[in-house]
Amino acid sequence: VTRPLTVLPVTGVPEVRPGDVLADLLAAAVELEDGDVVVVTQKVVSKAEGRLVRLGAEAGAAAAREVVERESVRVLRRRGDLVISETVHGFVCANAGVDRSNVEAGTAALLPVDPDRSARRIRDGLLGRAGVRVGVIVSDTFGRPWRRGLTDVAIGAAGVAAVVDLRGTTDAAGRELVVTEVCVADELASAAELVMGKAAGIPAAVVRGVDAAWLRESSVRTEVVRPPSEDLFR
Amino acid sequence: VTRPLTVLPVTGVPEVRPGDVLADLLAAAVELEDGDVVVVTQKVVSKAEGRLVRLGAEAGAAAAREVVERESVRVLRRRGDLVISETVHGFVCANAGVDRSNVEAGTAALLPVDPDRSARRIRDGLLGRAGVRVGVIVSDTFGRPWRRGLTDVAIGAAGVAAVVDLRGTTDAAGRELVVTEVCVADELASAAELVMGKAAGIPAAVVRGVDAAWLRESSVRTEVVRPPSEDLFR
């Protein structure tokens, strides 16, 4: 794990429309290498998958609220227009991930139905069309309790570990490590965000040089989403 | 924000002892450039600052519990040996950041008294001794609700923005962004963790190529720590 890591913004991807094949657009925009991890933002995945709803020009806020309720299985907190809820996927985030920025006026983007499957589809597409074995992460921008500011996290993954288990390994002094599980998928999503910017129209980034041991089958839903029964804060 | 980012592990730093000047050890281990962000793990900062307590060989668990209580201003949750509490700094984390891995048996490392000040001291030292203007982040490994796995976050910062405010900027379609504040300090800490590994004895990493606009005075305590009154989950 001592190689340098490089994070490359993917530029030159055209505006994504429903039905577009993201693997094709990405393969055309960037020269990928075996072992790269491609981080793709939720917004373009949702657009390609047609996960857009029309809200109507006037009833914007009310219609958006209705969509948020529909995408939620449980509301944790409300403050003004802000709803913190658990989505059908098990994510806890603001407004169930429903987002009105960077989409056409009067519409909103919903989260992909199954972001792990979205990641697998892109991964398989890149293998088939560009002939490269890469990991893929679908990322989104979430807030969190206790700390201000948003960070990007993984909502889907394929071909790259979501959580790496260090149990059984020892620290530099030879004692068994207590801190054992690192969510590398979220860390990769965060690293990718640093080169994307929110306004720059960069829908993806490539992380090159990740530990080869992390390149395995995975799933954010099974590895990262914490069931309410395990959660001290639900 | 479209340049590639490079994350370099800092290897060859000797075992850190109380009184060591981290800026000297880091400057000797890596060739820094103006505009780099140096991410230093809490563990070596705490060691250099002598933030170590002896627990006694036998009463390990009980003594550790006492230290955790002393470092906490408020306990949020308990489960078995795990305490989630708010530290004197305002961080919410497990066991008040008290850590028994990678330190001598029978001792524990406490968080630095003022991690922003720790970061400033390293930053000033690197300017004075190596002549480079860099940003410095002190990182630690925290869990979070709702998601499994730990990620590295910033507990102190100097010379690099903690939270970047995108308010007033517009998205690619020209509409004002709703999502406005990104915690780049936490994202930088996470990116750095990816090259460090928990067991490898790598106490720091350099992130090269960050947006020059982020290189300004900052503070994790004032920018990132969310006061309980603003927090929907306390």
Image (spheres, coloured by chain):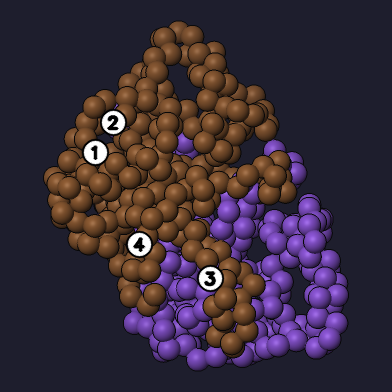
Chain colours: A brown, B purple
Q: Amino acid at mark 2?
A: Ala
Q: Which residue bears the numbered disc 4?
A: A215
Q: Amino acid at mark 1?
A: Leu
Query: What residue is drawn where x is 78% and y is 57%?
Result: B79
Instruction: State how far apart marks 4 and 1 are (Cα).
Output: 21 Å
Judge whether B86 appears above or below A2 on screen. above
Q: Residues within 10 Å of mark 4 (few under 14, many from 20)?
A: many
Judge whether A30 appears above or below B21 on screen. above
Circle 2 sits in a helix, a strand or a loop, which is it? helix
Q: Position of residue B67 (x, y in %)?
A: 81, 73
Instruction: Give the label, 4 or 1, closer to the camera.
Output: 4
Instruction: State how far apart marks 2 and 1 are (Cα).
Output: 7 Å
Instruction: State how far apart marks 2 and 4 are (Cα).
Output: 25 Å
Q: Which residue bears the numbered disc 2?
A: A48
Q: Amino acid at mark 4?
A: Leu
Which of the chains bears the disc numbered 1?
A
Circle 1 sits in a helix, a strand or a loop, which is it? helix
Instruction: Give the label, 3 or 1, closer to the camera.
Output: 3
Q: Which residue bears the numbered disc 3?
A: A166
Q: Which mark is residue A22?
A: 1
Judge whether B20 appears above or below A105 on screen. below
Instruction: Give the label, 2 or 4, closer to the camera.
Output: 4
Q: Are marks 2 and 1 in contact (CB under 8 Å)?
A: yes
